[in-house]
Amino acid sequence: MTIPNPGSPSLTPDPIIRVECLKASFGTDTILEDVSFEIFRGEIFIILGGSGCGKSTLLKHMIGLHEPASGKVFINGIDITSAEDKEMMRLRRETGVLFQSSALFGSMTLYENIALPLQEFIHLPQGVMDLIIKMKLGMVGLEGYENHLPSELSGGMKKRAGIARAMALDPTVLFFDEPSAGLDPVTSAELDMLIKNINKGIGTTMVIVTHELESIFGIAHRIIMLDKTKKGIIAEGNPLDLKEHSADPRVKAFFNRHVADHKK
């Protein structure tokens, strides 16, 4: 069993997520093969790698959008690849997802967007619903925006609103697919700080797909790096340690390329 990195907030080798021998295929095309790793409670865990290596594919298998060709994914001890409907319903309450596009419904206000998961899973008095939605928007710095439509928001504000909706049911795990995509560096840094504050404040486990250097080094407790040729993991650990000490030329090239891009 993998022991948590010393920089991780987890103090026990009891994973909240476990991926075992995952194979991801589309028709005859195998994207990932024999992928295994663990994520510990309270970690900010980043999945990175070059274009086409299967980062988003892996994330979609982890949240149950795609069924693996073989292998298993466990969240809170439940195998999502074979879970019954009742178990999957409970897991959907315990996890939140922020997709790259934020996936807000454009015809609905922020209040109505955040209310959707609450209405689907629990029945609350109107006053309680109002309070929860106000609190979630407050947590992401969008106090007073309940009646705004997504089209009235900037890109960064849409991402924040998407996080508020993903957090509506107080999930134990949040999944992010390229959260900084399309954002300027300042807005991206603000989003990273929000993610860190949520993680530090309430201990939510974060699983993030990103290629952004600032995010990788600024918020990750641990990372895994995928490689398109290997169709799997070529590095795992603390990103700074891997940058400085990895002997794998693919890992070194990845970080050095991003460092070079960052300095331009």
Image: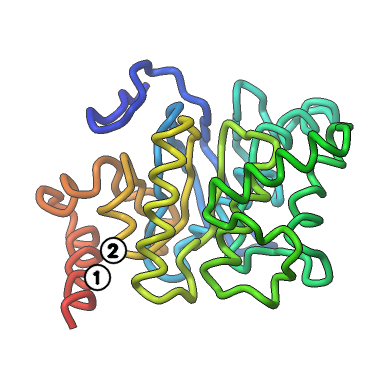
Q: Rounded to the nearest whole Å, what is the CA distance between mark 1 and mark 2?
A: 6 Å
Figure quadrant of residue 50: bottom left
Q: Residue at x 68, y 50 (%)?
A: 165
Secondary structure found at label 2: helix
* Residue furthest bottom as drawn: 264
Q: Residue at x 55, y 73 (%)?
A: 155
Secondary structure found at label 1: helix
Q: Where is residue 192 drawn, in percent x and y?
A: 39, 55
Q: Is residue 220 above or below residue 177?
A: above
The residue carrying pointer 1 sits among few (fewer than 14), some (14 to 19) or many (20 or more) residues within 10 Å by Cα, namely: some
Q: Is residue 168 above or below residue 18?
A: below
Q: Where is residue 222 drawn, in percent x and y?
A: 32, 41
Residue tagged 1: 258
Q: Where is residue 210 drawn, in percent x and y?
A: 42, 60
Amino acid type assigned to the residue bearing label 1 in the image: His
- Residue 243 or residue 195, whichever sits in front: 195
- Residue 13 or residue 226, whichever sits in front: 13
Q: Where is residue 86 drawn, in percent x and y?
A: 84, 26
- Residue 264 or residue 115, whichever sits in front: 115
Q: Are marks 1 and 2 in contact (CB under 8 Å)?
A: yes
Residue 213 shows which numbered tag? 2
